[in-house]
Image (spheres, rainbow, N blue to C red):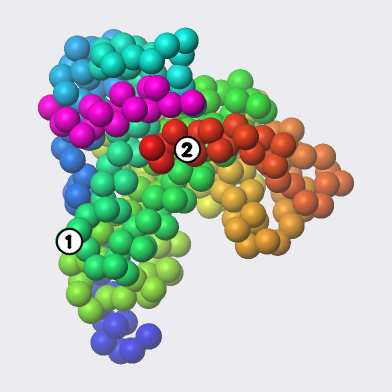
């Protein structure tokens, strides 16, 4: 990295630190309706009329919620065309997930971005989908956790990377490829801060903060942190082609995903379920 690039990167890191300290972490390109829905779904008594009103204010978002409610991942006995029925069928967590997926997709398709920037955003979007699908399957098959909340956790896990990328666009001389170290150091803390500002559950926030810990603390029952960590480990090894050895990761043994002597841990037996979730989120 050149001296000029290092100076620019240092300035960028300083801005990230300032944003964190001030709690000023609004996501550029994220519709206000998305944030409002996240917050509306966190109260003890969710007002379904308020949620529907927010969704209805954005026709494209309303169409996406209806589309996901009729997807193979969620579809009931019959197709529905009423937004209220769609929200009821999906439940709060899946509604939250659908609008997050929508916002991520819209950011990736922003025509104001360069081809290189869109490519980087697409990678972030694809990672969120892959993690969400694996989190859902792991939670459903191997734990007693709410699988829909696990799916939401997987989607939200990339918020830190997304924030760093979008903010980096304000630094015209900062190449995205030079952000890898910054991403690794900062994105979990930023994802945590954004989730806290949206009033997400403490367990979900903890999962985002600890998502890079390959051996999270043992608890009495499985946690969202363990599910997200396991999903990330399995995805990373799948992408790299390096076998995931169970004996090296007690986490996958604790969750019951693999036995101690397995030398190539995958979720291949659940690929159909993963693909159903994947296709539903992609639309």
Image mark for residue 112: 1
* Magenta span of residues: 57-72
Viewer-nearest residue: 152 or 83: 83
Q: Residues within 10 Å of mark 2 (few under 14, many from 20)?
A: some
Q: Nearer the viewer, mark 1 or mark 2?
A: 2
Residue at (64, 38) in percent of width and height:
271
Q: Is residue 159 magenta?
A: no
Q: Is residue 217 left or right of residue 108?
A: right
Q: Is residue 266 left or right of residue 92?
A: right
Position of the C terminus by quadrant: top left
Specify the farthest residue to the bottom.
Answer: 3
Query: In the shown orientation, is residue 75 left or right of residue 252?
Result: left
Q: Picture coordinates of residue 113 (x, y %)? A: 22, 63
Q: Which corner quadrant holds the N terminus?
A: bottom left
Taking 234 as reference, is 201 above or below it?
A: above
Alpha carbon of mark 1 to alpha carbon of mark 2: how far? Answer: 26 Å
Q: At which x and y percent is residue 94?
A: 39, 25
Q: Kindly report the secondary structure that dominates the magenta region of the rendered protein.
A: helix
Residue 58 on the magenta segment: yes
């Amino acid at each position: 990295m050149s001296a000029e690039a290092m100076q620019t990167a240092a300035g960028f890191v300083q801005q990230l630190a300032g944003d964190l300290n001030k709690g000023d972490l609004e996501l550029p390109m994220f519709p206000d309706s998305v944030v409002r829905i996240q917050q509306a779904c966190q109260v003890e008594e969710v007002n379904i009329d308020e949620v529907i009103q927010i969704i209805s204010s954005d026709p494209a978002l309303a169409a996406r919620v209806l589309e996901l409610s009729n997807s193979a991942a969620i579809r009931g006995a019959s197709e529905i065309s009423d937004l209220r029925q769609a929200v009821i069928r999906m439940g709060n967590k899946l509604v939250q997930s659908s609008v997050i997926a929508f916002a991520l997709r819209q950011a990736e398709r922003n025509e104001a971005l360069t081809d290189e920037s869109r490519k980087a955003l697409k990678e972030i979007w694809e990672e969120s989908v892959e993690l969400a699908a694996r989190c859902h399957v792991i939670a459903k098959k191997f734990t007693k956790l709410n699988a829909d909340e696990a799916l939401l956790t997987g989607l939200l896990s990339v918020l830190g990377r997304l924030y760093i990328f979008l903010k980096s666009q304000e630094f015209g001389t900062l190449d995205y490829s030079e952000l890898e170290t910054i991403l690794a150091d900062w994105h979990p803390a930023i994802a945590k801060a954004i989730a806290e500002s949206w009033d997400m559950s403490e367990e979900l926030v903890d999962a985002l903060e600890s998502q890079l810990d390959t051996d999270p603390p043992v608890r009495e029952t499985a946690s969202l942190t363990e599910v997200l960590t396991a999903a990330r480990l399995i995805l990373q090894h799948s992408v790299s082609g390096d076998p995931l050895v169970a004996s090296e990761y007690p986490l996958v043994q604790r969750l019951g995903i693999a036995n101690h002597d397995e030398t190539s841990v995958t979720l291949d037996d659940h690929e159909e379920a993963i693909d159903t979730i994947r296709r539903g989120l992609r639309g």
